[in-house]
Amino acid sequence: MAEMHEATDLVDEMQDLGEQSDEVSVRDMVEALGHRGFGPLIFVPALVVVSPLGGIPGLPSLMALVIVLIAVQILVGRDHFWLPDWIGCRAVSDDKVDKATRKIHAAAEWLDRHVGERLPRFTGHFAQTLAALAVIALCIMVPPLEFLPFAAVIPMLAIAIIGLAVTVRDGVLMLVGLAAAVAALIGGLYMLISM
């Protein structure tokens, strides 16, 4: 069986997008990753927020909206993903994409060495439905958390774990992601109440 390099491949794909144009739009990202299914379409936007790009004001909320739209379409059983034009045309410059992908490439290589197909039944249809619901709940927290510096990273990290679990069909990672989602929801609610 060939060795899987899913996380590295996704980061490389984003880096390639940045090299092909002066900016990378949300639509470019969805079109580049859509053929890979649900996992990458929630993993990569969440990873964008966890990366240095997450410091751009409004970007975490935009990525949360993209993820919610994808998750809702998963819940209703769509195979092809649709985004409204006003979201799809939002873009970041190629140099910002390049800097972010360079910084997270080593983490992607580490992930490829440590995750893989384990307990794949926990990444099946029921698990993906549960994951989509958890992801939507986490995304709802992102806009208010943006008022606290880098607090949006908390729910987005849980979303990234879930997205990676679906991408590489790793049931152990899915269980970790769902546990992280519960912790992020509790932690995020506490932070919002304490504001």
Image (cartoon, grey):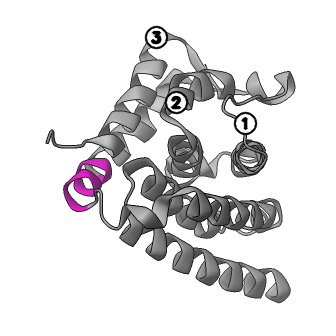
Residue 85 location (% of width, % of height): 83, 22
Q: Amino acid at mark 2?
A: Leu
The quarter of the picture where the N terminus appears is: top left
Give the CA distance from mark 3 to mark 2: 15 Å
Q: Circle 3 is placed at which residue position?
A: 20
Q: Please report the residue visible at 66 percent of the width from the left and 32 percent of the height from the top.
A: 79
Q: Residues within 10 Å of mark 2 (few under 14, many from 20)?
A: some
- The reply, left or right, for residue 71 in relation to residue 175 is right
Q: Quadrant of residue 186?
A: bottom right
The quarter of the picture where the C terminus appears is: bottom right
Q: Residues within 10 Å of mark 1 (few under 14, many from 20)?
A: few
- The reply, left or right, for residue 169 in relation to residue 154 is left
Give the CA distance from mark 1 to mark 3: 29 Å
State whether residue 132 is above or below residue 3: below
Q: Please report the residue visible at 78 percent of the width from the left and 67 percent of the height from the top.
A: 141
Residue 5 location (% of width, % of height): 26, 41
CB within 8 Å, label 1 to label 3:
no
Q: Circle 1 is placed at which residue position?
A: 78
For marks 2 and 1 on the same chain, the one whose residue lies earlier in the sequence:
2
Q: Which numbered marker is on residue 33?
A: 2
> In this rendering, which labeled residue sits more in front, label 2 or label 1?
1
Q: Please report the residue visible at 60 percent of the width from the left and 21 percent of the height from the top.
A: 28
For marks 1 and 3 on the same chain, the one whose residue lies earlier in the sequence:
3
Q: Amino acid at mark 3?
A: Gln
Give the CA distance from mark 2 to mark 1: 15 Å
Q: Is residue 75 a member of the stretch shown in magenta? A: no
Q: Amino acid at mark 1?
A: Arg
Residue 164 location (% of width, % of height): 44, 54
Viewer-side residue, 140 vs 52: 140
SS state under label 2:
helix
Q: Which residues are magenta?
A: 107-114
Residue 81 location (% of width, % of height): 70, 31
